[in-house]
Amino acid sequence: MSVVVTTVARFILPFMQLFGFYVLTGTEGPGGGFQGGVILASSFILYAITFGEGVDERWLKALKSFGLWIYAGVGTLTVFYSLFRAEFLNYSATFLSLIVPHPVARGILIADVIEVGIGMAVFASFVSMFFDVVARGDESG
């Protein structure tokens, strides 16, 4: 790679990742988990293309699984809590009422946790797809 490409990549990567994290928690702003995960994955793919480094597939599988567990776990906790309280998806009566007193703030916190789980799964999926395409290209060429 040329000096220009590596210098531009070093300059732009932190801003891409910062913007990806901003978009990731898009409860009150633009974006969401999918969009933030794609932006973060594109920054990682740019790093991999520019500097020629890869990642262990086990880490990507772990991130995909952990993101799915976060997403499913928050939903399952709210369903189980609502079974005992008979108030399904009522943020004023969730298990977080002791930690976060305001119901709107609880709703935003729950939505942000779900978005982080989605973002982790999307990030790992897109990076995994990129490395699969690269590996397939190496086999054929």
Image (spheres, helix red, strand yellow):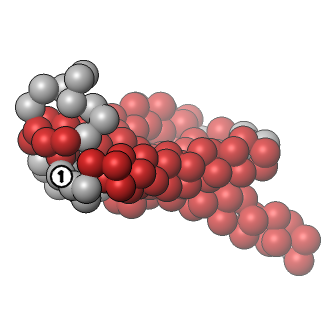
Q: Residue at the spot x=13%, y=42% of the render? A: 92
Q: Is residue 109 above or below residue 74?
A: above
Q: Nearer the viewer, residue 82 or 141?
A: 82
Q: Secondary structure at mark 1?
A: loop
Question: Which picture quadrant has residue 109?
Answer: top left
Horizontal arrangement in the rendering, residue 45 relative to residue 138 (left or right): left
| Residue 22 x %, y % | 26, 40
Residue 16 in the figure: left or right of residue 96: right
Q: Nearer the viewer, residue 22 or 79?
A: 79
The residue depicted at 40 percent of the width and 31 percent of the height is 14
Crowding at dot 1, Cα within 10 Å, few <14 / some 14-19 / many 20+, comes out as few
Q: Is residue 55 found left or right of 40 in the rendered image?
A: right
Q: Quadrant of residue 33?
A: bottom left
Q: Residue 88: x and y, percent?
A: 25, 58
Q: Identity of the amino acid at label 1?
A: Asn
| Residue 101 placement, left or right of 131 | left
Q: Write the residue at 80% across / 71% down.
A: 137
According to the picture, the residue beneath numbered tag 1 turns out to be: 90
In the displayed orientation, state which residue is furthest to the top.
99
Where, quadrant-wise, is the C terminus in this rendering? bottom right
The answer to whether one can see residue 33 in this image is no
The residue positioned 25% from the left and 40% from the top of the image is 94
Q: Nearer the viewer, residue 59 or 19?
A: 59
